[in-house]
Amino acid sequence: MHKDDLILISVDDHIAEPADMFEAHVPPRYRDRAPRVVIEPGGVQQWYYGDLRGRNMGLNAVAGKPREMYNIDASSYDEMRPGCFNVDERVRDMNAGGQLAGLNFPNWTGFSGQVLNQGPDRDVNLMMIKAYNDWHVDEWCGAHPGRFIPCGILPLFDVAEAAKEIRRLADKGCHAVTFSENPEGLNMPSIHTDHWYPLFEAASDNGTVLCCHIGSASRSSGALTSSDAPPSVAMTTSSMMSMLTLTELVWAEFWGRFPDLKFSITEGDIGWIPYFLWRSEHVLDRHSGWTNATFPDGYSGPADVFGKHLYTCFISDKIGVKLMEHFNADHVFWESDYPHSDSNWPFAPEDVIETMGHLPDDVINKITHENAMRAYSFDPFRHVPKERATAGRLREQAADVDVVTHVGRKASERDREAWARMTRFGQARTAQAADAE
Protein backbone atom coordinates (compact mmCIF):
# COMPACT_ATOMS: atom_id res chain seq x y z
CA MET A 1 0.00 0.00 0.00
CA HIS A 2 1.19 3.52 -0.78
CA LYS A 3 1.24 6.03 2.06
CA ASP A 4 -1.05 8.43 0.20
CA ASP A 5 -3.75 5.75 0.01
CA LEU A 6 -3.93 5.20 3.77
CA ILE A 7 -7.06 6.16 5.68
CA LEU A 8 -6.00 7.01 9.22
CA ILE A 9 -8.29 7.09 12.25
CA SER A 10 -6.51 7.45 15.58
CA VAL A 11 -8.06 5.96 18.73
CA ASP A 12 -5.88 8.06 21.02
CA ASP A 13 -5.43 11.80 20.64
CA HIS A 14 -5.84 14.53 23.26
CA ILE A 15 -7.22 18.03 23.75
CA ALA A 16 -5.53 20.83 25.65
CA GLU A 17 -8.99 22.12 26.52
CA PRO A 18 -9.67 25.81 25.74
CA ALA A 19 -10.12 28.14 28.71
CA ASP A 20 -13.72 29.04 27.79
CA MET A 21 -15.00 25.49 27.38
CA PHE A 22 -17.48 25.60 30.30
CA GLU A 23 -19.08 28.95 29.55
CA ALA A 24 -21.96 27.70 27.42
CA HIS A 25 -22.63 24.51 29.38
CA VAL A 26 -22.72 25.37 33.09
CA PRO A 27 -25.98 26.86 34.49
CA PRO A 28 -25.59 30.40 35.91
CA ARG A 29 -26.00 29.27 39.53
CA TYR A 30 -22.96 26.97 39.19
CA ARG A 31 -20.64 29.22 37.23
CA ASP A 32 -18.71 30.51 40.23
CA ARG A 33 -17.73 26.90 40.91
CA ALA A 34 -16.80 25.98 37.33
CA PRO A 35 -13.21 24.99 36.58
CA ARG A 36 -11.01 27.89 35.51
CA VAL A 37 -7.58 28.69 34.14
CA VAL A 38 -5.27 30.46 36.60
CA ILE A 39 -1.95 32.16 35.92
CA GLU A 40 0.51 30.73 38.42
CA PRO A 41 3.82 32.23 39.58
CA GLY A 42 6.25 32.05 36.71
CA GLY A 43 3.55 32.96 34.20
CA VAL A 44 2.29 29.45 33.45
CA GLN A 45 -1.40 28.82 32.89
CA GLN A 46 -3.01 26.03 34.86
CA TRP A 47 -6.52 24.62 35.22
CA TYR A 48 -8.04 24.53 38.70
CA TYR A 49 -11.29 22.99 39.93
CA GLY A 50 -11.84 24.74 43.24
CA ASP A 51 -8.62 24.06 45.11
CA LEU A 52 -7.79 21.02 42.98
CA ARG A 53 -4.95 21.58 40.52
CA GLY A 54 -5.52 19.98 37.15
CA ARG A 55 -2.98 18.03 35.13
CA ASN A 56 -0.45 20.33 33.51
CA MET A 57 -0.02 20.91 29.81
CA GLY A 58 3.78 20.48 29.49
CA LEU A 59 4.53 17.26 27.54
CA ASN A 60 0.83 17.05 26.72
CA ALA A 61 0.99 19.86 24.16
CA VAL A 62 4.26 19.69 22.23
CA ALA A 63 3.06 18.93 18.70
CA GLY A 64 5.38 20.37 16.09
CA LYS A 65 8.16 21.25 18.53
CA PRO A 66 11.71 19.89 18.31
CA ARG A 67 12.56 17.66 21.29
CA GLU A 68 14.82 20.39 22.70
CA MET A 69 11.63 22.40 23.34
CA TYR A 70 9.68 19.69 25.17
CA ASN A 71 8.72 21.00 28.58
CA ILE A 72 7.61 19.21 31.75
CA ASP A 73 6.44 22.30 33.55
CA ALA A 74 2.94 23.61 32.87
CA SER A 75 2.80 25.63 29.69
CA SER A 76 0.56 28.42 28.43
CA TYR A 77 -1.72 28.59 25.43
CA ASP A 78 0.54 30.99 23.57
CA GLU A 79 3.42 28.51 23.91
CA MET A 80 1.69 25.74 21.96
CA ARG A 81 0.35 25.44 18.44
CA PRO A 82 -3.34 26.39 18.19
CA GLY A 83 -4.29 22.89 17.01
CA CYS A 84 -3.83 21.72 20.59
CA PHE A 85 -6.87 23.68 21.78
CA ASN A 86 -8.67 25.16 18.75
CA VAL A 87 -10.85 22.65 16.91
CA ASP A 88 -10.64 24.36 13.53
CA GLU A 89 -6.85 24.44 13.71
CA ARG A 90 -6.86 20.84 14.94
CA VAL A 91 -8.60 19.73 11.76
CA ARG A 92 -6.06 21.67 9.68
CA ASP A 93 -3.28 19.87 11.56
CA MET A 94 -5.02 16.54 11.02
CA ASN A 95 -5.17 17.28 7.30
CA ALA A 96 -1.47 18.19 7.29
CA GLY A 97 -0.71 14.89 8.98
CA GLY A 98 -2.91 12.88 6.62
CA GLN A 99 -5.27 11.86 9.42
CA LEU A 100 -9.00 11.59 8.78
CA ALA A 101 -10.32 11.30 12.33
CA GLY A 102 -9.41 10.79 15.96
CA LEU A 103 -10.76 9.90 19.39
CA ASN A 104 -9.75 12.68 21.78
CA PHE A 105 -9.10 11.98 25.45
CA PRO A 106 -9.32 14.73 28.05
CA ASN A 107 -6.19 16.32 29.42
CA TRP A 108 -6.40 18.67 32.40
CA THR A 109 -9.11 16.57 34.08
CA GLY A 110 -6.91 13.48 34.09
CA PHE A 111 -7.40 10.76 31.49
CA SER A 112 -10.37 9.27 33.36
CA GLY A 113 -11.70 12.61 34.58
CA GLN A 114 -10.09 12.17 37.99
CA VAL A 115 -10.02 15.87 38.89
CA LEU A 116 -13.74 16.40 38.24
CA ASN A 117 -14.48 13.24 40.24
CA GLN A 118 -12.54 14.46 43.28
CA GLY A 119 -14.31 17.72 44.03
CA PRO A 120 -15.91 17.95 47.49
CA ASP A 121 -19.51 18.44 46.25
CA ARG A 122 -20.85 15.40 44.39
CA ASP A 123 -23.75 17.32 42.80
CA VAL A 124 -21.38 19.94 41.44
CA ASN A 125 -19.00 17.24 40.23
CA LEU A 126 -21.83 15.61 38.30
CA MET A 127 -22.85 18.94 36.79
CA MET A 128 -19.29 19.69 35.64
CA ILE A 129 -18.78 16.21 34.18
CA LYS A 130 -21.97 16.54 32.15
CA ALA A 131 -20.92 20.03 31.07
CA TYR A 132 -17.55 18.68 29.94
CA ASN A 133 -19.25 15.93 27.94
CA ASP A 134 -21.72 18.32 26.31
CA TRP A 135 -18.86 20.64 25.30
CA HIS A 136 -16.86 17.71 23.96
CA VAL A 137 -19.64 16.06 21.97
CA ASP A 138 -21.63 19.11 20.82
CA GLU A 139 -18.90 21.72 20.34
CA TRP A 140 -15.60 19.95 19.75
CA CYS A 141 -16.81 16.89 17.84
CA GLY A 142 -19.88 18.62 16.45
CA ALA A 143 -17.84 21.39 14.82
CA HIS A 144 -16.50 19.01 12.17
CA PRO A 145 -18.74 15.94 11.68
CA GLY A 146 -16.86 12.86 10.58
CA ARG A 147 -13.55 14.03 11.99
CA PHE A 148 -13.84 13.05 15.67
CA ILE A 149 -14.92 9.95 17.59
CA PRO A 150 -16.59 11.37 20.73
CA CYS A 151 -15.30 10.14 24.10
CA GLY A 152 -17.00 11.05 27.38
CA ILE A 153 -15.90 11.01 31.00
CA LEU A 154 -17.92 9.47 33.82
CA PRO A 155 -18.91 10.31 37.40
CA LEU A 156 -17.07 7.27 38.72
CA PHE A 157 -17.83 8.32 42.31
CA ASP A 158 -21.45 7.19 41.74
CA VAL A 159 -21.80 4.03 39.68
CA ALA A 160 -25.53 4.50 39.11
CA GLU A 161 -24.98 8.01 37.75
CA ALA A 162 -22.09 6.70 35.65
CA ALA A 163 -24.40 4.14 34.07
CA LYS A 164 -26.95 6.89 33.36
CA GLU A 165 -24.26 9.03 31.75
CA ILE A 166 -23.22 6.15 29.49
CA ARG A 167 -26.81 5.90 28.29
CA ARG A 168 -27.15 9.67 27.87
CA LEU A 169 -23.93 9.82 25.85
CA ALA A 170 -24.97 6.87 23.69
CA ASP A 171 -28.16 8.75 22.83
CA LYS A 172 -25.88 11.59 21.64
CA GLY A 173 -23.92 9.17 19.44
CA CYS A 174 -20.98 8.74 21.82
CA HIS A 175 -19.88 5.13 22.28
CA ALA A 176 -16.54 5.63 24.05
CA VAL A 177 -15.99 6.62 27.68
CA THR A 178 -12.93 6.80 29.85
CA PHE A 179 -12.54 4.30 32.69
CA SER A 180 -9.68 3.98 35.14
CA GLU A 181 -6.93 1.46 34.47
CA ASN A 182 -7.24 0.65 38.18
CA PRO A 183 -10.13 2.27 40.08
CA GLU A 184 -8.64 1.12 43.39
CA GLY A 185 -5.78 3.53 42.71
CA LEU A 186 -8.39 6.31 42.93
CA ASN A 187 -9.73 5.00 46.25
CA MET A 188 -12.66 3.32 44.52
CA PRO A 189 -13.73 -0.35 44.59
CA SER A 190 -11.71 -2.90 42.63
CA ILE A 191 -12.97 -4.19 39.29
CA HIS A 192 -13.08 -7.63 40.92
CA THR A 193 -16.10 -6.62 43.00
CA ASP A 194 -19.68 -6.38 41.76
CA HIS A 195 -19.68 -2.64 42.47
CA TRP A 196 -19.12 -1.81 38.80
CA TYR A 197 -21.74 -4.16 37.38
CA PRO A 198 -24.34 -1.42 36.65
CA LEU A 199 -21.71 0.52 34.68
CA PHE A 200 -20.55 -2.62 32.85
CA GLU A 201 -24.14 -3.48 32.00
CA ALA A 202 -24.82 -0.01 30.58
CA ALA A 203 -21.65 -0.12 28.48
CA SER A 204 -22.43 -3.60 27.21
CA ASP A 205 -26.05 -2.79 26.36
CA ASN A 206 -25.15 0.44 24.53
CA GLY A 207 -22.12 -0.77 22.59
CA THR A 208 -19.89 1.59 24.55
CA VAL A 209 -16.17 0.88 24.92
CA LEU A 210 -14.52 1.45 28.32
CA CYS A 211 -11.18 3.10 27.52
CA CYS A 212 -8.36 2.55 30.04
CA HIS A 213 -5.65 5.07 29.23
CA ILE A 214 -2.25 4.86 30.90
CA GLY A 215 -2.18 7.25 33.83
CA SER A 216 -5.93 6.99 34.42
CA ALA A 217 -5.37 5.71 37.95
CA SER A 218 -3.20 8.72 38.89
CA ARG A 219 -0.19 6.50 39.30
CA SER A 220 2.87 5.69 37.25
CA SER A 221 5.62 3.11 37.00
CA GLY A 222 7.78 5.49 39.06
CA ALA A 223 6.25 3.98 42.19
CA LEU A 224 7.96 0.70 41.29
CA THR A 225 11.42 2.00 40.41
CA SER A 226 14.24 3.55 42.37
CA SER A 227 13.41 6.90 43.91
CA ASP A 228 16.40 8.49 42.17
CA ALA A 229 15.94 6.81 38.79
CA PRO A 230 16.62 9.21 35.90
CA PRO A 231 13.54 10.48 34.04
CA SER A 232 14.22 8.21 31.06
CA VAL A 233 13.39 5.20 33.24
CA ALA A 234 9.81 6.29 33.86
CA MET A 235 9.31 7.30 30.23
CA THR A 236 10.55 3.87 29.11
CA THR A 237 8.40 1.91 31.57
CA SER A 238 5.16 3.83 31.05
CA SER A 239 3.51 0.78 29.44
CA MET A 240 3.88 -1.16 32.69
CA MET A 241 0.57 0.22 33.90
CA SER A 242 -1.16 -1.19 30.83
CA MET A 243 0.50 -4.54 31.47
CA LEU A 244 -1.10 -4.66 34.90
CA THR A 245 -4.50 -3.57 33.59
CA LEU A 246 -4.55 -6.16 30.84
CA THR A 247 -3.50 -8.93 33.20
CA GLU A 248 -6.25 -8.09 35.68
CA LEU A 249 -8.85 -7.98 32.91
CA VAL A 250 -7.99 -11.35 31.38
CA TRP A 251 -8.42 -12.96 34.83
CA ALA A 252 -11.58 -11.03 35.73
CA GLU A 253 -14.61 -13.18 36.51
CA PHE A 254 -17.43 -10.98 35.18
CA TRP A 255 -17.24 -11.81 31.47
CA GLY A 256 -20.03 -14.37 31.63
CA ARG A 257 -22.40 -11.63 32.82
CA PHE A 258 -21.37 -9.16 30.12
CA PRO A 259 -20.53 -11.08 26.94
CA ASP A 260 -20.61 -7.94 24.78
CA LEU A 261 -18.44 -5.75 27.06
CA LYS A 262 -15.31 -4.25 25.50
CA PHE A 263 -12.31 -2.53 27.08
CA SER A 264 -9.60 -0.59 25.29
CA ILE A 265 -6.04 -0.66 26.64
CA THR A 266 -4.86 2.73 25.42
CA GLU A 267 -1.36 4.07 24.78
CA GLY A 268 0.36 1.01 26.16
CA ASP A 269 1.71 -0.38 22.84
CA ILE A 270 1.36 -4.09 22.04
CA GLY A 271 4.76 -5.77 21.66
CA TRP A 272 4.69 -7.08 25.23
CA ILE A 273 1.19 -8.60 25.01
CA PRO A 274 2.01 -12.02 23.50
CA TYR A 275 4.38 -12.77 26.36
CA PHE A 276 1.83 -11.90 29.05
CA LEU A 277 -0.81 -13.97 27.29
CA TRP A 278 1.60 -16.90 27.18
CA ARG A 279 2.40 -16.40 30.85
CA SER A 280 -1.30 -16.27 31.71
CA GLU A 281 -1.96 -19.52 29.86
CA HIS A 282 1.04 -21.06 31.62
CA VAL A 283 -0.38 -20.00 34.99
CA LEU A 284 -3.75 -21.50 34.03
CA ASP A 285 -2.05 -24.78 33.17
CA ARG A 286 0.21 -24.98 36.22
CA HIS A 287 -1.67 -23.20 39.00
CA SER A 288 -5.41 -23.42 38.37
CA GLY A 289 -5.58 -26.40 40.73
CA TRP A 290 -5.22 -24.06 43.68
CA THR A 291 -6.13 -20.64 42.25
CA ASN A 292 -9.57 -21.95 41.22
CA ALA A 293 -9.67 -19.68 38.19
CA THR A 294 -12.92 -20.07 36.29
CA PHE A 295 -14.10 -18.95 32.86
CA PRO A 296 -17.57 -18.83 31.31
CA ASP A 297 -18.78 -21.57 29.00
CA GLY A 298 -17.19 -21.14 25.61
CA TYR A 299 -14.00 -19.55 26.98
CA SER A 300 -10.80 -21.58 27.00
CA GLY A 301 -8.79 -19.21 29.19
CA PRO A 302 -7.14 -15.78 29.48
CA ALA A 303 -6.02 -15.57 25.86
CA ASP A 304 -9.60 -16.23 24.77
CA VAL A 305 -10.85 -13.39 26.98
CA PHE A 306 -8.25 -11.12 25.42
CA GLY A 307 -9.25 -12.05 21.89
CA LYS A 308 -12.94 -11.46 22.51
CA HIS A 309 -13.06 -8.42 24.81
CA LEU A 310 -9.92 -6.29 24.74
CA TYR A 311 -8.84 -3.69 22.20
CA THR A 312 -5.21 -2.56 21.96
CA CYS A 313 -3.42 0.17 20.03
CA PHE A 314 0.02 1.45 19.10
CA ILE A 315 1.72 4.38 17.41
CA SER A 316 4.82 2.83 15.84
CA ASP A 317 5.45 -0.41 17.73
CA LYS A 318 7.46 -2.33 15.17
CA ILE A 319 7.94 -5.33 17.48
CA GLY A 320 4.22 -5.74 18.06
CA VAL A 321 3.44 -5.68 14.36
CA LYS A 322 5.90 -8.55 13.80
CA LEU A 323 3.85 -10.59 16.27
CA MET A 324 0.45 -10.03 14.63
CA GLU A 325 -0.23 -13.78 14.47
CA HIS A 326 -0.79 -13.65 18.25
CA PHE A 327 -3.55 -11.03 17.97
CA ASN A 328 -7.13 -10.84 16.84
CA ALA A 329 -6.53 -8.50 13.90
CA ASP A 330 -10.01 -7.05 14.40
CA HIS A 331 -8.99 -5.72 17.84
CA VAL A 332 -5.75 -3.89 17.01
CA PHE A 333 -5.89 -0.13 16.33
CA TRP A 334 -3.59 2.68 15.28
CA GLU A 335 -3.11 5.84 17.36
CA SER A 336 -1.45 9.20 16.78
CA ASP A 337 -1.37 10.62 20.34
CA TYR A 338 -1.40 14.21 19.02
CA PRO A 339 -0.37 16.59 20.60
CA HIS A 340 1.57 14.51 23.14
CA SER A 341 5.30 13.92 23.06
CA ASP A 342 5.06 10.34 21.70
CA SER A 343 3.10 11.41 18.63
CA ASN A 344 4.55 10.93 15.14
CA TRP A 345 2.59 13.90 13.75
CA PRO A 346 2.87 15.11 11.01
CA PHE A 347 4.65 12.06 9.61
CA ALA A 348 2.14 9.34 10.46
CA PRO A 349 1.62 8.07 6.89
CA GLU A 350 5.35 7.58 6.42
CA ASP A 351 5.70 5.91 9.82
CA VAL A 352 2.67 3.66 9.30
CA ILE A 353 4.12 2.33 6.07
CA GLU A 354 7.54 1.83 7.66
CA THR A 355 5.95 0.04 10.62
CA MET A 356 3.33 -2.16 8.96
CA GLY A 357 3.72 -1.74 5.22
CA HIS A 358 4.68 -5.42 4.93
CA LEU A 359 1.25 -6.52 6.13
CA PRO A 360 -1.54 -7.37 3.67
CA ASP A 361 -3.60 -4.35 2.63
CA ASP A 362 -6.75 -5.73 4.28
CA VAL A 363 -4.96 -5.99 7.64
CA ILE A 364 -3.53 -2.47 7.30
CA ASN A 365 -7.01 -1.15 6.59
CA LYS A 366 -8.38 -2.87 9.68
CA ILE A 367 -5.71 -1.41 11.95
CA THR A 368 -5.71 2.09 10.48
CA HIS A 369 -9.46 2.73 10.30
CA GLU A 370 -11.93 -0.13 9.85
CA ASN A 371 -11.62 -1.51 13.39
CA ALA A 372 -12.13 1.94 14.91
CA MET A 373 -15.23 2.56 12.80
CA ARG A 374 -16.81 -0.71 13.89
CA ALA A 375 -15.82 -0.59 17.57
CA TYR A 376 -17.00 2.98 18.15
CA SER A 377 -20.07 2.97 15.87
CA PHE A 378 -18.41 5.69 13.82
CA ASP A 379 -18.97 6.30 10.11
CA PRO A 380 -16.90 9.24 8.82
CA PHE A 381 -17.84 8.53 5.22
CA ARG A 382 -21.32 9.93 5.84
CA HIS A 383 -19.59 13.30 5.98
CA VAL A 384 -16.30 12.86 4.09
CA PRO A 385 -16.44 10.87 0.84
CA LYS A 386 -14.06 7.93 1.08
CA GLU A 387 -12.10 8.98 -1.98
CA ARG A 388 -11.35 12.31 -0.26
CA ALA A 389 -10.45 10.71 3.09
CA THR A 390 -7.03 9.35 2.18
CA ALA A 391 -3.81 10.75 3.59
CA GLY A 392 -2.79 12.11 0.23
CA ARG A 393 -6.06 13.92 -0.46
CA LEU A 394 -6.20 15.40 3.05
CA ARG A 395 -2.65 16.70 2.78
CA GLU A 396 -3.58 18.43 -0.46
CA GLN A 397 -6.00 20.56 1.59
CA ALA A 398 -3.27 21.62 4.04
CA ALA A 399 -0.46 22.85 1.84
CA ASP A 400 -0.43 26.14 3.77
CA VAL A 401 -0.08 24.56 7.23
CA ASP A 402 3.31 25.14 8.86
CA VAL A 403 3.96 21.90 10.72
CA VAL A 404 6.80 23.40 12.77
CA THR A 405 5.72 25.03 16.05
CA HIS A 406 7.68 28.24 16.48
CA VAL A 407 6.49 29.26 19.96
CA GLY A 408 7.60 27.96 23.34
CA ARG A 409 10.88 27.76 25.16
CA LYS A 410 13.87 25.47 25.26
CA ALA A 411 13.95 22.76 27.88
CA SER A 412 16.00 23.75 30.90
CA GLU A 413 16.75 22.93 34.50
CA ARG A 414 13.28 24.28 35.27
CA ASP A 415 11.79 21.23 33.55
CA ARG A 416 14.01 18.76 35.40
CA GLU A 417 13.04 20.44 38.67
CA ALA A 418 9.37 20.14 37.72
CA TRP A 419 9.91 16.44 37.04
CA ALA A 420 11.53 15.99 40.43
CA ARG A 421 8.58 17.70 42.14
CA MET A 422 6.11 15.51 40.30
CA THR A 423 8.09 12.39 41.14
CA ARG A 424 8.35 13.24 44.83
CA PHE A 425 4.62 13.98 44.92
CA GLY A 426 3.84 10.60 43.38
CA GLN A 427 6.15 8.80 45.81
CA ALA A 428 4.61 10.64 48.75
CA ARG A 429 1.10 9.60 47.71
CA THR A 430 2.22 5.99 47.36
CA ALA A 431 3.82 6.06 50.80
CA GLN A 432 0.68 7.60 52.32
CA ALA A 433 -1.47 4.89 50.79
CA ALA A 434 0.85 2.20 52.18
CA ASP A 435 0.77 3.77 55.65
CA ALA A 436 -3.01 3.89 55.54
CA GLU A 437 -3.13 0.15 55.01
Image (tube, rainbow, N blue to C red):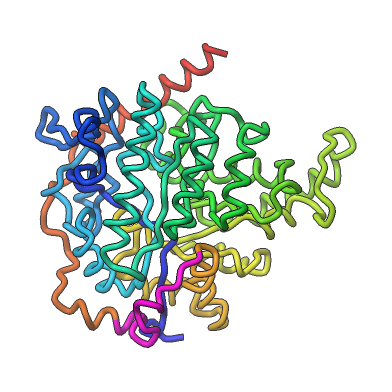
Q: Is residue 379 magenta?
A: yes
The residue drawn where x is 54% and y is 54% is 209
Q: Is residue 248 visible?
A: yes
Q: Is residue 410 left or right of residue 374?
A: left
Q: Is residue 411 visible?
A: no
Counting from the top left corner in percent of width and height, residue 145 is at: 32, 69
> Which of the 4 image quadrants contains residue 66?
bottom left
Q: Nearer the viewer, residue 405 or 11?
A: 11
Give the position of the C terminus as an image quadrant: top right
Q: Which portion, as a residue range, is magenta?
A: 377-393
Q: Nearer the viewer, residue 33 or 1?
A: 33
Counting from the top left corner in percent of width and height, residue 330 is at: 61, 69
The residue drawn where x is 69% and y is 49% is 258
The residue drawn where x is 51% and y is 31% is 224
Residue 283 drawn above or below residue 392: above
Residue 151 drawn above or below residue 384: above
Residue 431 drawn above or below residue 99: above
Counting from the top left corner in percent of width and height, residue 177 is at: 47, 49
Q: Is residue 333 magenta?
A: no
Counting from the top left corner in percent of width and height, residue 405 is at: 16, 59
Q: Residue furthest right?
A: 289
